[in-house]
Image (tube, grey):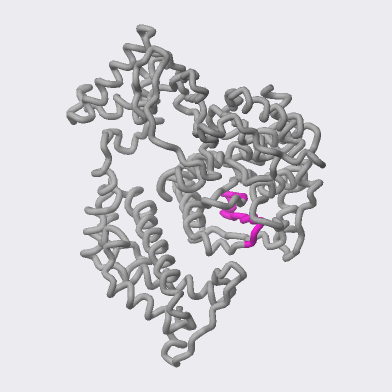
Amino acid sequence: MHRIVRRKLLGVRKNVEYNEKDQPHGKAAKEMQSYIGVLARTKIPITIPSWKKVDMEMKNKLWESVELAFVLGPERKKMVLASAACKWREFKSRLMSQYILPFKDDVELLQTPPEEYNFIELADWKSFILHNEQSERRAMCEYPHRMSRLGYAGLEDELLKTMDPKDIDRATLWKKAREDKSGNILDEKVKQKGNRIDELSKQVKDGTLKVEALNSNSQPTPNIVGNASEKASYSTSKGISMKDEERQFFNVHEEDNGEGKYKDSKNPRKRKYNDEKLNEVPELDFHGMPKSLKLLCRYAQSMIKMDGKCITFEMEEEVFGSPRTTHILNEDILQLGGMEKLSATCIVIYMRYLYNVLQDSDKLGFVIFVDPAIISAPWCGTSFVRSRTLADRFKGAHNDQMFFIPYNSGDHWMLTVVHPAKEIIYHVDSVYRSIMMDDEWKHIVNDAIGIYNRQRSKQGRKNPVWKIMMGAPKQPTNKECGYYVMRFMRDLINDDIERQLAKWEKMNETTYKQEEIDEVHNEWAEFVTDEYL
């Protein structure tokens, strides 16, 4: 930063280069991003509740400061301010997750700002603690719980001391989380919702409502390809209507309503076919397709014609740390066969296959999988929530264990390999993007390692080491990222992991041949056919 300030005093501005996607890259771009972060942290007060409420004069001054240090056209102002907004929010989140929440029971440690952020005014720091964004979000919560830091997992542990495990379902947990010490629900709106839950529970016991218990640990896999879900009402075979928000407590079987509009409650996504094209079968080019995948795709096409259900199975706890219900839609199979962008389900299924490979080798204790459905953007909560989730997965990791994390930033799959004990992260991307371009994911992983270290009472590094795998194979178009992530994991597991990562660390322009992608296709299809059909 001193170099930038010195250049500004001399009137020297650095040119910023842009890649073919019009994204800033190179040394000057990195300096600019760092400078934007410093300005966002030091010039915008943390007491402002949201970026929208930041005064336009402050935003203009920030832009002018950046413009004085780098050669930027006026069209770049939006990009600079968007980057500043992201870094400012991350800074506030980091203050909350690292310097406030872990010490909220020790008021003495919260009297002054952290030493490394001594530019924060004392009044602003105290105001931030009292009126932080977390409390604002909680105030907006429609049905606030009373669990404090216990969480649902901790609450369930407490209930198991006095209750039969069979009696502890999601409805019970929801109600218990909102009761006071005397077992009463004080909030009238919460009480009404609790009464509705009791009513539905009674109907289940009486047999007037057909449901299937949903394991509280199961993790439905969202579709990150982009099929938007819609609000709807769900009807049981007995005609009892359940609203969408009530369905979180019960997994209701839906029946064909006689009009060919099958609704399957086990399916975590809506069918992507509209009513007019419900039974329309997507065309596929079977030429050159592996035999096992070809047979599986024809099976999926025939099921679409018959409006068939998805493949549903329970995945073992050992794979991702907790059991999960997984649903393979016919669309998932056809995505794979048509080399379309992949859903999280497809990648999760291949990770389950690789788990078998690990079992047959001597690497089972050295490679741990993280479920992409609980960590990828944007459905998994705030950055802090995802850091906590990741830290929980790291818990108990020994010195030689590496964690494989397929991550989707919203429209692109990448692989992150984390060695938490050594505080080293390997970033493997089939379209080279500097990790600086995705600050949110970087902070999520860094904060997770920080929480992991505090759980072990270890000091740890100030910042974990990120290694960008510049030589990892590059995808030829914009659709192959999911296939490349699966192949990355395969290559690492079938070779010495650190040796393969060392190869990818060296700059190299390579790509996977179609035959290499077809190996993944074939393994995926054979696994699904053998295990679940």
Q: Give me the residue at 54% from left, 78% from top.
A: 16
Residue 221 is situated, as x and y percent measured from the top left of the image, at 53, 35
Q: Residue furthest top?
A: 206
* 94 relative to 506 in the view: left or right: left
User: In the rendered view, does 140 fall on the left or right side of 391?
Assistant: left
Question: For the view shown, which residue lies furthest in the front direction?
Answer: 276
| Percent position of residue 111, x then y | 25, 58
404 in magenta: no
Q: Quadrant of the C terminus?
A: top right
Count every numbered label the image shows and give the total.
0
Whether residue 220 can be seen here: no
Whether residue 474 sits left or right of residue 42 in the image: it is right
Q: Nearer the viewer, residue 330 or 274?
A: 274
At 69% across and 38% down in the image, what residue appears? 283
Q: Is residue 4 above or below residue 185?
A: below
Magenta stretch?
415-432
On the image, the x and y values in percent for residue 274 come to 51, 35
Q: Is residue 420 magenta?
A: yes
Seen at 41% across and 90% down, the residue is 9
Q: Is residue 458 above or below residue 91?
A: above
